[in-house]
Amino acid sequence: LVELKTLSQPAAAAPADPQIKAAFESGDYDQVINLYAQTGSTPGQVAAAETTFQYGQALLKNHQEAEARKVLAELLARMRSQKGQDELLLQLLQTAADLNFALESHDEARKQYEELVRLSIEKGANKEEWAGLQLAALQPGGAAPSEMKEYATLLRNYLAFSPKRDGYN
């Protein structure tokens, strides 16, 4: 009976994890991934959106794009139903759209950039310029297929860029 009650109640979001935040800010992405793996041990609790976003970004930094895409898509679905985290939602949308563009999932990227432009304008966040430029590149005939492939590689490397690791301290 206790299990049924637990299953029927929505999971409570935990507060942002200070250890994961510290590891992320110091560029220790392996540590972020390890710490996040340990957070799943508390039944009935979901990691804070900020913590999950940092985990998704750590996966990107470690070139684990497929796993990052899954994590960010799940977080995006969760955050669309929540209120009060507009800035994080806009960051998440941009990262997810960029990742989909980098992985050559152009239709999904286009939808996310369009949503980013719409939400940015609605919220007065002024984040629509990047999304607008990306949308222009995704328009049919916007760029040759070879250019799109090269740009996807560049974008994937940009998403994984880490100044500390890549020698730009």
Image (cartoon, helix red, strand yellow):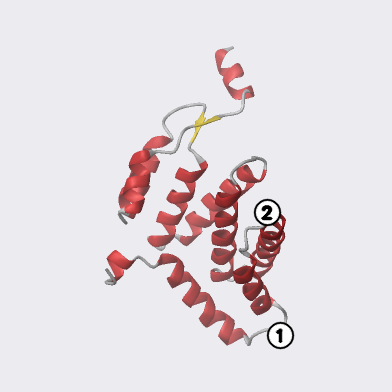
Q: Which mark is residue 107?
A: none
**Residue 139 located left or right of residue 6:** right
**Residue 51 located left or right of residue 111:** left
Image height check: is 128 above or below 51?
below
Q: Which mark is residue 123?
A: 2
> Where does the image place residue 94, in percent across and percent down from the top left?
58, 61
Q: Which mark is residue 141?
A: 1
Q: Residue at x 63, y 75 (%)?
A: 133
Quarter of the figure that contains the C terminus: bottom left
First in sequence: mark 1 or mark 2? 2
Image height check: is 165 above or below 53?
below
> Where does the image place residue 27, in percent across and percent down from the top left?
32, 56
**Residue 26 located left or right of residue 133:** left
Q: Residue at x 61, y 18 (%)?
A: 4
Near-viewer residue (6 or 133): 133
> Where does the image place residue 54, in percent across and percent down from the top left?
44, 50
Q: Amino acid at mark 2?
A: Lys
Q: Residue at x 56, y 66 (%)?
A: 98
**Residue 82 found in image quarter:** top right
